[in-house]
Image: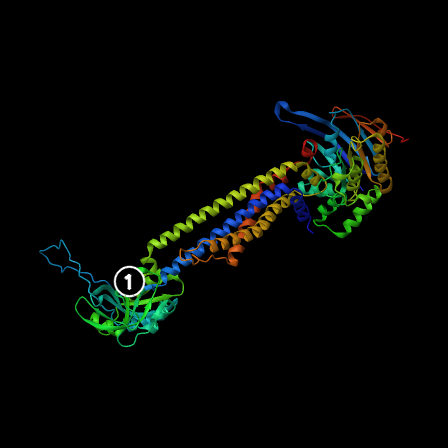
Amino acid sequence: MGEAGGDVLRLEGITRDFGEGEARTRVLRGVDLALRRGEFAALMGPSGSGKSTLLHIMGLLDRPTGGRILLDGQDTGLLDDDGLTRCRGRTLGFVFQFHHLLPGFTALENVMIPMAADRGRLETSMRECGMALLERVGLSARADNRVTTLSGGQAQRVAIARSLAMNPKIVLADEPTGNLDTRTADDVFSLLRDANRAQDVTFLVVTHDRRLAERTDRIIELVDGRIVSDHPNDPR
Amino acid sequence: MRFEWFIAIRYLREGKAQTALVLGGATVGVAVLIFLTALISGLQRTLVAQTLSAQAHVFVKAPERVARPLPSPDRVADHVEKVPDRVRSIEQWQRVMASIGTIPGVLAATPTAAGAAFASRGPATKSVTLRGIDPESFIRVIDVVPKMRAGRFALEGAEAIVGTVLASDLGVGVGDKVRLSTPEGRGDVFTISGVFDLGNKEVNARWVFVPLRSAQTMLDIPGGATTIEVKVAEIFEAERLARDIARRHGLSADSWMELNQQLLVGLRSQSASSWMIQVLVVLAVALGIASVLGVSVIQKSREIGILKATGTSTGAIQRIFLLEGALVGGAGSVLGALLGSGMAVAFARLARAPTGDPLFPVDLTPGLFLGAAAVAIVTGTLAAWFPATRAARLEPAEVIRYG
């Protein structure tokens, strides 16, 4: 349990600058944010507001220029690169806008990769675990297909299965439905919601889509690198 | 299966064209390595063997006589006449030979009494080198027996063995008689008991083997031996052993290496140029692997970012690409060994002397294959170092966003 009770992720005064000297621009201007266990939150904001940057910093893919990130109570600023990688692998899952699956591998292998990377080897138990995850996203029939043969919606479902492979505490999703038609987007969004309810996983979903955001528990709005509104939402 | 192996093998299988390119490069590189080494070492071994087929490894002789002017208070010598060297025996050669026989690395030693002579039959006279030998110990130093073209290698009483060229010059064969005489006028008639072919025209035209005792009489060195000829176990140790013998006994000793310096210089420059070619080939293969893997790292940068985002450590990323290099080197060494030995065997079959005999055998040893494989795997891994490090340093956030 984190130091702040049910906070699974806590950002304190996060800033992030890009560029050097004259060209230096501050993309995040002091973000404080806490995500509670089991929460399903939406992060909204116009293009260039710093949503993706914030998501990458929360996901330990990028280090902030200033501020602290407490992941499950642990200050991640104290970790070296390999420590961050391990921490990221075990507590965080990602779903990206363009699914970002590894093209040379099958759906099942893509789901197994986070587990194999963590253990340093492929084990038969990972295969069963991967199949169970694909079953949950309704793709067990396509397990041994190359991901390049899957449709956009199917690929995004595989990506969701992959994000859940390590039983993460938090899943960060960057425009997970941004590339899908409305119906498929609804299906994928429902899958995320199901995973959130079934496993008590915290979700933060970056989206442009007000309609989808309305289906979350909390809506955070980022403008110009600052949180301008953060209010609970009653999902319809 | 190790995670890194799984990813590396899949990447190699996926990037078919790239893998074929680097694998082809490694294969050709290893093939050149194996072909050149087998060829050069076979050629050199044959050249040395040919040279040594009619030559002992070390020749021990009486020390050269040096003229020293007598010191005189009122005269300064401005010219010292060199003493004309007549045929001289090694003092107490039996004792010296026994002592040489005990030196580690010496296989056999034999005494010879050698000097200039004429061989004549009827009107034909040829200048020859008389070599009085003890056949039994002589064949342990130079094995003439398999090189006999007629008769046998044995000397009993007044018998002589001549080379093929001399035999034809004088028109003699086994059982014929030939007169041998020294410039001093001592001589005798010998019956030819055998004809040899030592593979060297000069030797075949000039050498005449007679019993040691007969040569001693003709050269006027009763009971003496002018040379002790020595065979050693390691032919390239001959020079060291010669110096050792000379120092121990106060005699003059020459090794075959000293007597065949041109051959040795030739062999060395041949080895050096073959080394140079091999180093350049390895370098070219390394650059090829490095550049192809470098391109593949750039093409895969997004995937590398995804691997990192899903928990793959920096070290594991680096190992994946190092492994790709090593695997290419390993597979290349297997294919290259096949290609290289095929080329070597085909070359040995095709390249023949005008007589139709194979020129020389190629040396395909297990050590050569292991060495080439080691070179290929190490080269592949080292060549992958730069691309692998570059891959490991990629920032996941940057390549996922912009990659």
Question: Residue tagged by mark 1?
Answer: B205
> Does residue B372 sit above or below A27 in this rendering?
below
Residue that extends furthest to the top in the rendered view of this protein: A22
Q: Nearer the viewer, residue B18 or B377?
A: B18
Q: Nearer the viewer, residue A169 or B118?
A: B118
Q: Indicate the quadrant where residue A145 lies.
A: top right
Q: Position of residue B279 (x, y in %)?
A: 48, 46
- Would residue A210 appear left or right of B128 to someone viewing this image? right
Q: Position of residue B324 (x, y in %)?
A: 62, 46
Judged from the image, the secondary structure of the residue bearing numbered disc 1 is helix
Quadrant placement of the C terminus of chain B: top right
Q: Residue at x 40, y 65 (%)?
A: B233
Q: Position of residue A154 (x, y in %)?
A: 80, 38
- Would residue B30 appear left or right of B141 to someone viewing this image? right
On what subunit does the disc labeled 1 rest? B
Q: Is residue A189 visible?
A: yes
Q: Position of residue A112 (x, y in %)?
A: 75, 46
- Would residue A76 appear left or right of B236 to someone viewing this image? right
Q: Is residue B253 visible?
A: no
Q: Indicate the quadrant where residue B217 lies.
A: bottom left
Q: Amino acid at mark 1?
A: Ala
